[in-house]
Image (spheres, grey):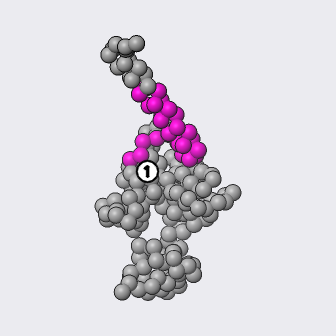
Amino acid sequence: MTLDLGVIVGISAALSALVAVGALLAARRVQARSGLPRARVVYTDSGAGGRATDLLFSRRYGLVGKPDYLLEADGWVIPVEVKPTRRAAEPYPGDILQLLAYCLLVEEKHGRPAYGLLRYASATFRLDYTDAARAHLLETVAAIRAATRAGERGRSHDDAGRCTHCMFNEVCDESLAAPAD
């Protein structure tokens, strides 16, 4: 039995289409399990290889940050912070403030976001960026600055590993990180 070249091409195209559909369905399952919305990624923190230009910066508020992702969905730019090993029924207060700071930075560059997403190992929390949330962030930033001016600063942890990976460890006079030789 011989097959016509046209039949072979048709079978090959059908198989390719099935593989593509399977890959698309698998990707959608992974995305659905992530707890994040289907959206276009407009920014991702590239990690250690990132450049200073990758930072979001607000001169007005004196804040700098690098969210893990910025997604674009329904006309909004949405900051996403991922804490892959954290497991909790509610977001930690420090994580909330971090995400609110990213919302403020997004507001400065892209316009005010409606919300931000905080992804833990098994849950995603949507934090609405309300006037009250924004005010809470700005009050907290002001309190931290006042404490710093009053000489009340201090490391907020005793974890050398955290210091080692901190972007300020080389200039911090309280770093627990071992100096590089």
109 to 179, vertically: above or below: above
Name the residue beneath numbered marker 1: 70
Label 1 is placed on what type of residue? Leu
The residue drawn where x is 52% and y is 37% is 26
The secondary structure making up most of the magenta span is: helix
Q: Where residue 5 sits: x, y (%)?
A: 32, 16
94 left or right of 181 in image: right
In the image, is residue 24 part of the stretch drawn in magenta? yes
How many marks can you see? 1
166 to 106, vertically: above or below: below
In the image, is residue 38 part of the stretch drawn in magenta? yes
Disc 1 secondary structure class: strand
Magenta residues span: 16-42
| Front-lying residue, 162 or 24 | 24
The residue drawn where x is 40% and y is 54% is 44
Q: Where residue 109 sits: x, y (%)?
A: 36, 53
| Front-lying residue, 79 or 175 | 175
The residue drawn where x is 35% and y is 19% is 9
Q: Quadrant of the N terminus?
A: top left
Q: In the orientation shown, which residue stands out farthest toward the front?
A: 1
Can residue 56 be seen here? no
| Front-lying residue, 151 or 52 | 52
The residue drawn where x is 42% and y is 82% is 172
| Front-lying residue, 73 or 24 | 24
Q: Where residue 113 sits: x, y (%)?
A: 47, 48
Can residue 169 be seen here? yes
Residue 132: quadrant of the picture: bottom right
Q: Quadrant of the C terminus?
A: bottom left
Crowd around label 1: few <14 · some 14–19 · many ≥20 (10 Å):
many
